[in-house]
Image (cartoon, grey):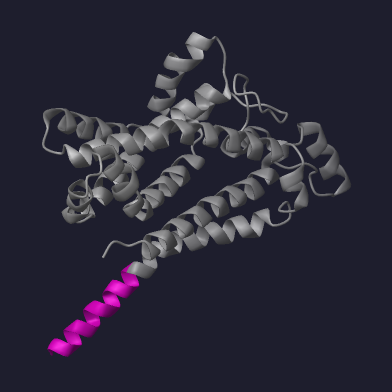
C-alpha cells in the first residue's frame, strides 16, 4: 500500500509540474504559428515599418517590410546604461548587507530593497519621469535606463548578499591572516569566489527588465529611427510591440517582435541556469 501511495504521489507531482509548463508551450506555439512569416533577416536589419508600408504590403499579398532594428539598438543602449548604474551599486550594497547584516542601517536597506522589488513597474516609471525626465526637460534613453536600473537593483543586491553569505568564513579569515587589507579580501577573494551567483543574479535582473514597457513609455517615449544619443528619445522592442498593437495595419508585426523578445529572455534564463549549475557553491 505504501508503494502504491508513493507512486500515485509521484505521478501527481509530475502531472502538476507538466501543467505549470503548458502555458509556456502554448505561448511559444502561438507565437511560432503567427510570427514565423515575419521572422526573417529584415527583422534584424531594418527599422520598424510605417502604417502605409503595411497597407501596401497587404494590398499586394506580401510580407510587411521592415523590422525592429531601431528597437534592438535602442533596447541595447538602454540596457547597457541601466547595467552601468545598477550593477556597481547593487554589488556594493550587497557586500555591505552581507558584511554588516546585523546593523540597523543594513536592515533598513534590506527592507527598502524588498519594497522596490515589489513596486509596480508603472510606479517606477513615474518616479523616473519625476527624477530624470522633468529635470532634463525631455524624454531620453538615460531616463529609461534609470527606470530599469531601479528595477534591476533588488535582484543584484540580494543575489550578491545571499551568495556572499554562502561562502565559508575561513576565506575571509585566511586572507586577513595573511596580511591582506579588508578591501583586498573583498575584491580579490570574496567577490571572485561569489562570481557565479552574482552573475546569475545579474542575468536574471536583465531578463526581468527586458520585457518592461510601462516604465519606457513614461521615460524614453520611442523613436522611428536608430538613435545612439542617450539624451534623446529612443525605442525598444517592448515599445515597438505596443506601437504595433495600437496600429491595426501592423498587428502582424506583433507576433514576430514578441517571439524575438521571448527568445532573448528565454536564452538569458537558460544561460543563467547553466552558470548557476557550473559555479554552484559546494
Q: Is residue 13 magenta?
A: yes
Q: Could you tell me which residue is drawn at 85 percent across and 39 percent down? A: 56
Query: Is 175 positioned to the left or the right of 21 in the image?
Result: left
Q: Could you tell me which residue is drawn at 29 percent across and 34 percent down? A: 93
Residue 102 vertical placement versus 225 (above, below) = below
Query: Is 197 positioned to the left or the right of 270 in the image?
Result: left
Give the x, y percent position of residue 44.
Answer: 72, 46
Query: Is 191 positioned to the left or the right of 246 in the image?
Result: left
Quarter of the picture containing the N terminus is bottom left
Q: Could you tell me which residue is drawn at 32 percent across and 52 percent down? A: 194
Give the x, y percent position of residue 282.
Answer: 26, 65
Pick the front one: 34 or 165: 165
The quadrant in which residue 229 appears is top right
Pick the front one: 128 or 251: 128
Pick the front one: 48 or 156: 156
In this picture, which residue range is highlighted in magenta?
1-16
Give the x, y percent position of residue 217.
Answer: 53, 26
Q: Could you tell me which residue is drawn at 46 percent across and 55 percent down? A: 269
Residue 48 vertical placement versus 160 (above, below) = above
The reply to whether residue 174 is in sight is: yes
The reply to whether residue 236 is in sight is: no
Amino acid at each position: 500500500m505504501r508503494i502504491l501511495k508513493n507512486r500515485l504521489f509521484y505521478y501527481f507531482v509530475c502531472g502538476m509540474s507538466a501543467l505549470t509548463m503548458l502555458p509556456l508551450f502554448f505561448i511559444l506555439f502561438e507565437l511560432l504559428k503567427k510570427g514565423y512569416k515575419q521572422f526573417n533577416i529584415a527583422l534584424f536589419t531594418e527599422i520598424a515599418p510605417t502604417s502605409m508600408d503595411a497597407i501596401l504590403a497587404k494590398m499586394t499579398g506580401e510580407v510587411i517590410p521592415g523590422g525592429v532594428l531601431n528597437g534592438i539598438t535602442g533596447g541595447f543602449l538602454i540596457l547597457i546604461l541601466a547595467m552601468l548604474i545598477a550593477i556597481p551599486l547593487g554589488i556594493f550594497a550587497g557586500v555591505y548587507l552581507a558584511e554588516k547584516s546585523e546593523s540597523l542601517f543594513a536592515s533598513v536597506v534590506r527592507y527598502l530593497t524588498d519594497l522596490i522589488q515589489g513596486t509596480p513597474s508603472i510606479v517606477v516609471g513615474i518616479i523616473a519621469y519625476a527624477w530624470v525626465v522633468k529635470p532634463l526637460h525631455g524624454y531620453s534613453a538615460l531616463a529609461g535606463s534609470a527606470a530599469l536600473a531601479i528595477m534591476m537593483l533588488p535582484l543584484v543586491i540580494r543575489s550578491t548578499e545571499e551568495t556572499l553569505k554562502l561562502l565559508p568564513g575561513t576565506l575571509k579569515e585566511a586572507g586577513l591572516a595573511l596580511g591582506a587589507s579588508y578591501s583586498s579580501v573583498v575584491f580579490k577573494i570574496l567577490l571572485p569566489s561569489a562570481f557565479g551567483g552574482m552573475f546569475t543574479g545579474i542575468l536574471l535582473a536583465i531578463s526581468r527588465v527586458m520585457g518592461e514597457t510601462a516604465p519606457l513609455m513614461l521615460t524614453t517615449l520611442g523613436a522611428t529611427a536608430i538613435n545612439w544619443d542617450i539624451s534623446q528619445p529612443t525605442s525598444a522592442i517592448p515599445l515597438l510591440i505596443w506601437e504595433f498593437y495600437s496600429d491595426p495595419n501592423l498587428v502582424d508585426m506583433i507576433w514576430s517582435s514578441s517571439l524575438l523578445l521571448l527568445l532573448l529572455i528565454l536564452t538569458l534564463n537558460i544561460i543563467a541556469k547553466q552558470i548557476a549549475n557550473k559555479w554552484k557553491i559546494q
